[in-house]
């Protein structure tokens, strides 16, 4: 006699849901690793900030002193000659960025909207100028600036930073303008738009996120540059990067005062980057995904 199966035997077996424990452990490890990496990158800035509030003896103490009474003397000393160097950095960074955009935006527009067989070669050549080590060109640059009477002048520093940032502007803006649908330009041409209208009325407004991100990067690169500024300026046009090095004298290294000057130099860029971080991320990701 055949035995009929019971309802329990007929019903399918329930599958056991996968445990969430391995995923939670992995997320926890990734979180800890992220905080550790952030601390490693932030530690030099923290160390510089602590040294700025110490005396010179405390800054050079071994082992390091972490319990001390903060002082503001170093900032007062740094601020006595901080103003001219700050003005030089602002003029050089903003002036070179503006000049790089005046020259680079039309070039990027022409290479993106009206490409030729030589467009790729031109872009590659412009990028190749960034591969050359700065120490390999400083001697001819120094002689050139000397003959043109541009040594230790703000116009010379602006020209130097413009040539440094121009490939960045052309390459980044070329990538942004390439992502603009060509059908928009064709529709504008049907309505009688000129090249000027295409550039000022279409390309520039649609590339504003890219312009913001590129401008921020160009300002940061010019603000942080030290090699050319150290070799092409002395006092009349010395930016903040050269001003920081002035605390190393024949009497020794004033580490605490140098740290205070470095904090004053880094703070404006960090504040500006923090305020514009949303626009920067939006601009850097613009055109990355079609």
Image (cartoon, grey):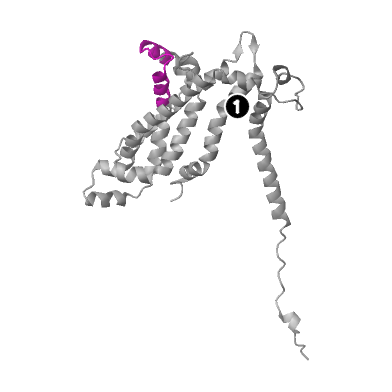
The one nearer the camera, 51 or 6, is 51
Report helix, strand or loop for mark 1: helix
Determine whether, in the image, residue 219 is placed left or right of residue 203. Answer: right
Total numbered circles? 1
Q: Is 206 inside the magenta-drawn segment?
A: no
* Snapshot quadrant of residue 14: bottom right
Residue drawn at x 59%, y 20% as measured from the top left:
78
Residue position marked by numbered label 1 in the rendering: 263
- Give the residue at the far bottom of this rendering: 1
The one nearer the camera, 65 or 175, is 65
Q: Is 156 inside the magenta-drawn segment?
A: yes
Residue 25 in the image: above or below residue 276: below
Q: Position of residue 142 (x, y in %)?
A: 43, 13
Chief SS of the magenta region: helix
The one nearer the camera, 203 or 21, is 203
The one nearer the camera, 141 or 129, is 141
Q: Position of residue 74 (x, y in %)?
A: 64, 20
- Give the residue at the far top of this rendering: 250
Determine whether, in the image, residue 217 is placed left or right of residue 33. Answer: left
- Give the residue at the far left of this rendering: 192
Residue 14 in the image: above or below residue 286: below
* Snapshot quadrant of residue 244: top right
Residue 235 in the image: above or below residue 109: above
Mark 1 is surrounded, within 10 Å at the Cα level, by few (under 14), some (14 to 19) or many (20 or more) other residues, namely some
Q: Position of residue 7 (x, y in %)?
A: 74, 83
Determine whether, in the image, residue 243 is placed left or right of residue 259. Answer: left
Q: Quadrant of the N terminus?
A: bottom right
Residue drawn at x 57%, y 30% as measured from the top left:
267
What range is drawn magenta here?
A: 141-163
Q: Position of residue 13 (x, y in %)?
A: 72, 74
């Amino acid at each position: 006699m055949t035995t009929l199966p019971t309802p329990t035997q007929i019903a399918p077996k329930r599958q056991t849901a996968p445990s969430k424990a391995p995923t939670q452990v992995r997320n926890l490890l990734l979180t800890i690793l992220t905080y550790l990496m952030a601390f490693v990158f932030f530690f030099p800035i923290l160390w510089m900030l602590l040294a700025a509030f110490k005396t010179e003896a405390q800054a050079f103490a071994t082992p390091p002193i972490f319990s001390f009474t903060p002082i503001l003397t170093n900032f007062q000393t740094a601020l006595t000659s901080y103003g001219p160097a700050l003005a030089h950095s602002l003029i050089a960074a903003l002036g070179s960025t503006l000049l790089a955009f005046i020259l680079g935006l039309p070039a990027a527009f022409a290479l993106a909207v009206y490409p030729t067989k030589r467009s790729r070669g031109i872009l590659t050549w412009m990028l190749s100028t960034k591969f050359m080590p700065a120490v390999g060109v400083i001697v001819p640059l120094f002689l050139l600036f000397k003959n043109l009477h541009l040594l230790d002048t703000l116009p010379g520093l602006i020209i130097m930073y413009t040539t440094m940032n121009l490939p960045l502007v052309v390459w980044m803006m070329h990538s942004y303008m390439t992502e603009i649908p060509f059908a928009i330009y064709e529709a504008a041409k049907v309505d009688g738009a000129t090249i000027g209208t295409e550039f000022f009325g279409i390309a520039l407004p649609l590339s504003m996120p890219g312009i913001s991100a590129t401008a921020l990067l160009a300002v940061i690169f010019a603000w942080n540059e030290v090699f050319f500024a150290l070799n092409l300026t002395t006092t009349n046009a010395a930016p903040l990067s050269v001003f920081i090095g002035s605390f190393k004298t024949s009497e020794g290294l004033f580490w605490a005062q140098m740290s205070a000057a470095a904090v004053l130099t880094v703070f404006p860029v960090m504040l500006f980057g923090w305020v514009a971080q949303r626009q920067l991320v939006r601009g850097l990701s613009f055109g990355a995904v079609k």
